[in-house]
Each structure stands twice: as structure tokens, then as C-alpha cells.
Image: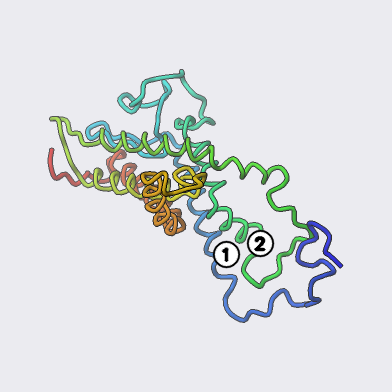
Amino acid sequence: MSAPVGAGVRNAARARIAARTLRTDRWWQTPALTVLGLVAFIVYATVRSFARTAYWVDDYHYLTPFYSPCVSASCLPGSSHFGVWVGELPRWIPLAFVSLPFLLLFRLTCYYYRKAYYRSFWLSPPACGVAEPHRTYTGETRFPLIVQNAHRYFFYIGFVISLVNTYDAILAFHSPSGFGFGLGNVILVVNVILLWGYTLSCHSCRHVTGGRLKHFSKHPVRYKLWTYISKLNARHMQFAWITLGTLVLTDFYIMLVASGTISDLRFIG
């Protein structure tokens, strides 16, 4: 007798085991830590994105990624690297309204993050060999989860935003006297490099470079790119977590400098 579609782990064809799991290890630890890590980042990023304070250091042209690109009349003078596109924004709209929604969708639909929050927040399932609490399962075939299939399109936008962050990092080599270089530049550049690592290690990027090819021998350049991206792809989970940390570190450092709490450690200029 075949199990009904979407019947979940407790359908009639499954073994009748009363216990949720027979595992004796700390299987709950990974989903619990994932919840703590993601919630901490979401709270910090949300507060900072709407704070509208200490996000731009005019002397050194440091702009936090949470406010890039800043294209409204509400932005501080000098922080609009791509010009002013719109007028004053109400407080409930973040200054980086052009990028933040797409970055959120890029991360939400990411293959790794799906696994992370499906297991930790929805407990679907919380770990291998542990029954999930849901009685039915439809996967990503219905709204809203069917939107996950648009990840490949959000990748293209994420790629453009990485270019914007790179441009911001280049402009930050500035001082009141001209060229300048400080600790803030190190942090911005390292953050951008790791963001590129996360973006290029994306499964969609791997598919773009070689996923549709039938004969690698006829496309040696794309095959080479595919092999490099495949190596990065194996580290996608690490990049996913590391970049959350570097985004917070970059924003926090710029906030401290912009607010006058600390002075930037300058090497040149």
C-alpha cells in the first residue's frame, strides 16, 4: 500500500514508533544554535537598518553595507554614491530600500539557508532520524514556499549588489587630504571579498556557469569556471555564516567611528 502524497512522517506506511527519535546524542543542539544565530542577526540588522544614525564617515567615505546604496534625499551628504533618485523617505522605509529587500530574498531562498531554517524554525525535520511534528508535507509546491524557485533570479540581483559593495569599498580609500587607508578599509575589503565568496559559491551561480552544458569539451572556458565555482560551492555553508558575521562587524565598526566612540586606526592619511 503506497502512502498518500503529503502524508508526512506519521502516515500508515511508516513504522509505528511512539518516540520522536531513538537518537541519544544532542541532535537538538544544531537547530537551537541556528535559531540563536539567525535571530541575533535579524534583530541587529533590523535595528541598524532603520536607525538612520552613524552609518557614514565623511572623512574616510566609510558607508555601512546596511545603507548601501543610499539614493534618497534622506541620506547624509556624500553617502549617495549613485546619486539621489527619490525625495525624503518616511522613517518606516529603510534608506537602503533598493537593495535590502532583494538581499533578504536572496538569502531566504538560498539552498543552504532553506535547510537551516526549515530544520531550526519549522522543525521539518529538526535532524536526521527525528520525526517532525507536522502531519502533512507539501514541500515547495505551494505558496509561499513555491517562491523559493525564484532563487536564480535573486542571484542576479545579489550579484549586482555585490558590485555596489565593491564600489563602496574602493571609494573608501579616502582621507581629507586625498588617498587614505585605515583599519576601516581592511574591514570593508575583507567583508567584500567574503561576500563575493558567498555570492559566487551560490548553487545558482554554479548552474549559470555550467549547469546547462551538455558537452564540457566544447566549452573549455565555461568548464574551467564551473570547476572553480564548484570548489567554492562546497564551502557555501561556511560563507553563509561568515558573511553574516562580517556584515555585523563592518556595520558595528563604522557605527563606532561615525558616532565618535572610537577613532579609525589610520595607516595612510
Q: Which residue is mark 2?
A: 123
Amino acid carrying label 1: it is Pro
Examine the rendering and report whether any part of residue 248 can be seen: no
Residue type at mark 2: give it.
Answer: Leu
Discs 2, 1 touching: Cβ within 8 Å: yes
> Which one is nearer the viewer's eye here, 82 or 265?
82
Query: Callout 2 environment at 10 Å: few (<14), some (14 to 19), or many (20+)?
Result: some
Q: Quadrant of the C terminus?
A: top left
x, y (%) of residue 75? 39, 26
Most extreme residue toward the right, as rendered? Answer: 1
Residue occupying image coordinates x 25% and y 44%? 184
Location of mark 1 (residue): 31
Badge 1: residue crowd in 10 Å (few <14, some 14–19, many ≥20): many
Q: Position of residue 183 (x, y in %)?
A: 22, 47
Residue at the (71%, 65%) spot, across then down: 132
Estimate the x, y position of residue 48 in percent, counting from the top left: 44, 41
Q: Secondary structure at mark 2?
A: loop
Q: Residue at x 36, y 47 (%)?
A: 252
> Cα distance, mark 2 to mark 1?
8 Å
Q: Which mark is residue 208?
A: none
Which image quarter holds the N terminus? bottom right
